[in-house]
């Protein structure tokens, strides 16, 4: 299983407009192409998850994630905010890179946790944050995943 199998260029946004946590979550959800009702339900689920504890894992990275009936297969999206957002990350630093993961409640392939783990592992590579800042096209994001073998 490779991370790049789950990403598509239309679910990568390199210029997130939102300046607050909720705005960023809404923009990420918007990349999944759901209808309004499903977007609202997914936003509630992600907010509930964030209330348990921020998904900001440090080093400028957050991985908001949840299980929801609004998707029938695992979906991921990536967003970048160059100015950073206060996401209540564990290191109390701004978050610049957002990896959204949404999976159905019952998932035969059971890829939710492995994908979450791979994103966390990819994010911890020393050069990844700087390289994510340099990207100018979604295709370059996909190329970085390929280069890192994830």
Image: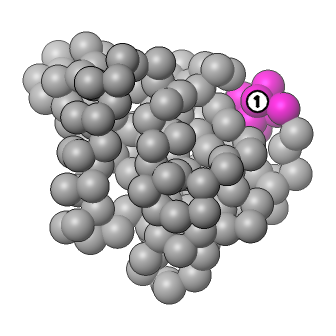
In the picture, the quarter occupied by the C terminus is top right
Q: Left of 134 or right of it: where is 150?
A: left
Count numbered badges in the picture: 1
Taking the magenta stretch, the answer to whether it contains residue 46 is: no
Q: Residue furthest bottom?
A: 92
Magenta segment = 137-144
Front residue of this view, candidates 85 and 89? 85
Percent position of residue 66, x then y: 26, 43
Q: Can you see residue 72?
A: yes
**In the image, residue 57 above or below residue 97:** below
Percent position of residue 30, x then y: 49, 31
**In the image, residue 84 above or below residue 71:** below
Front residue of this view, candidates 91 and 51? 51
Q: Which residue is mark 1?
A: 138
Q: Kindly identify the residue that appears in the image at 26 percent across and 70 percent down.
A: 53
Taking the magenta stretch, the answer to whether it contains residue 138 is: yes
**Coloration mode:** one colour
Crowd rating for badge 1 (residues with CA inside 10 Å; few <14, some 14–19, many 20+):
some
Q: Left of 19 or right of it: where is 51?
A: left
In the picture, the quarter occupied by the N terminus is top left
Front residue of this view, candidates 148 and 101? 101
Q: Kindly identify the residue that appears in the image at 27 percent across and 55 percent down.
A: 47
Prevailing SS of the magenta stretch: helix
Percent position of residue 18, x then y: 60, 54
Q: Kindly identify the residue that appears in the image at 45 percent across and 75 percent down.
A: 89
Q: Dot 1 lies on which element?
A: helix
Percent position of residue 44, x then y: 23, 46
């Amino acid at each position: 299983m490779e991370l790049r199998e789950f990403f598509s260029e239309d679910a990568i946004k390199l210029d997130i407009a939102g300046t607050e946590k909720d705005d960023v979550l809404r923009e990420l959800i918007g990349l999944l192409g759901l209808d309004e009702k499903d977007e609202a339900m997914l936003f509630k689920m992600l907010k509930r998850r964030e209330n348990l504890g921020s998904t900001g894992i440090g080093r400028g990275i957050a991985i908001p994630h949840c299980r929801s009936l609004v998707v029938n297969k695992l979906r991921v999206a990536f967003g970048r905010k160059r100015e950073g957002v206060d996401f209540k990350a564990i290191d109390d630093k701004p978050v610049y890179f957002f990896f959204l993961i949404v999976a159905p409640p019952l998932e035969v392939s059971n890829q939710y946790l492995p994908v979450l783990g791979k994103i966390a592992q990819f994010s911890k590579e020393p050069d990844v944050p700087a390289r994510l800042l340099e990207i100018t096209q979604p295709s370059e994001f996909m190329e970085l995943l390929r280069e890192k073998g994830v």
